[in-house]
Image: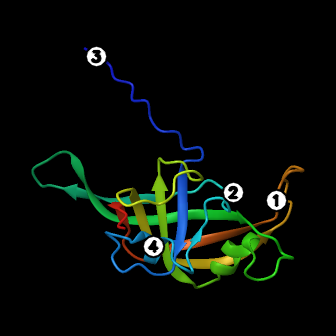
Amino acid sequence: MTVVFPEGVSAEGNIRVAFVPAIADLDAPKIATEVKATGSVDLSCYITSEFGVAGEQATGEDRRLCSKEVFQSLGRVTRSIPATEYVYDPQADAGETDNKAYDTLKKDTKGFLVIRYGLDAQDVDWAAGQKVDVVPVTCGVQVKLGNQGADEFAKLRIQQTFAVSGPMAEDVELAA
């Protein structure tokens, strides 16, 4: 018997995230007119925390009169995005590069997070055919974090929760 050890893909530097204000078809987000459109922000180099979409599925009992066992049934799925942290500059003017994430992700703003896994976030641009996840979100309150127990190299940052506000589309291909 041959044992296979898949090489895997490094997560370090290989996750790209964009906030996109509007997407017409979640199953085929368009690069030029949606993902890279005016108002969209590539958050990849702003985010300082671990990032991803979590999921939890409820289970319930499935009892049968004829059985001495209790089985399980799968129920609803709850998607969530753990609190996310990103850098900002409290003294920068509105619209400056250092504050694009801070200026865009205001409380109650609705949009979509487009997440690409497995390709270099800095060197590989968005391209047709790449697989992404598209998550509809509503932005929560922005909480300013200071140097809370961090080391001397820590940056000022914002902590924010994103509420997943609709069904997400997984492993869909970007359209030109």
The kind of residue tagged 1 is Lys
Residue identifier under label 3: 2
* Lower sequence index among marks 3 and 1: 3
User: Does label 2 or label 3 sit earlier along the sequence?
Assistant: 3
Label 4 and label 2: CA atoms lie apart by: 27 Å
Residue 102 percent coordinates (x, y):
70, 75
Q: Residues within 10 Å of mark 3 (few under 14, many from 20)?
A: few
From this view, report whether residue 172 is shown above or below residue 99: above
Tell me the quarter of the picture where residue 104 sits: bottom right
Residue at point 55% right, 75% down?
40
Q: CA distance from mark 2 to mark 3?
A: 41 Å
- Return the residue at label 2: 48
Taking the spot 72% from the left edge, 81% from the top edge, the residue there is 95
**Which amino acid type is marked by label 3?**
Thr
Name the foreground residue: 16 vs 144: 16
Label 1, residues with CA under 10 Å away: few <14, some 14-19, many ≥20: some
The label shown at residue 32 is 4
Query: Which residue is most to the top?
Result: 1
Classify mark 1: helix, strand or loop: loop
Q: Residue furthest right?
A: 152
Pointer 1 residue? 155
Tag 2–tag 1 contact (CB < 8 Å): yes
Residue 134: x percent and y percent?
Answer: 42, 67
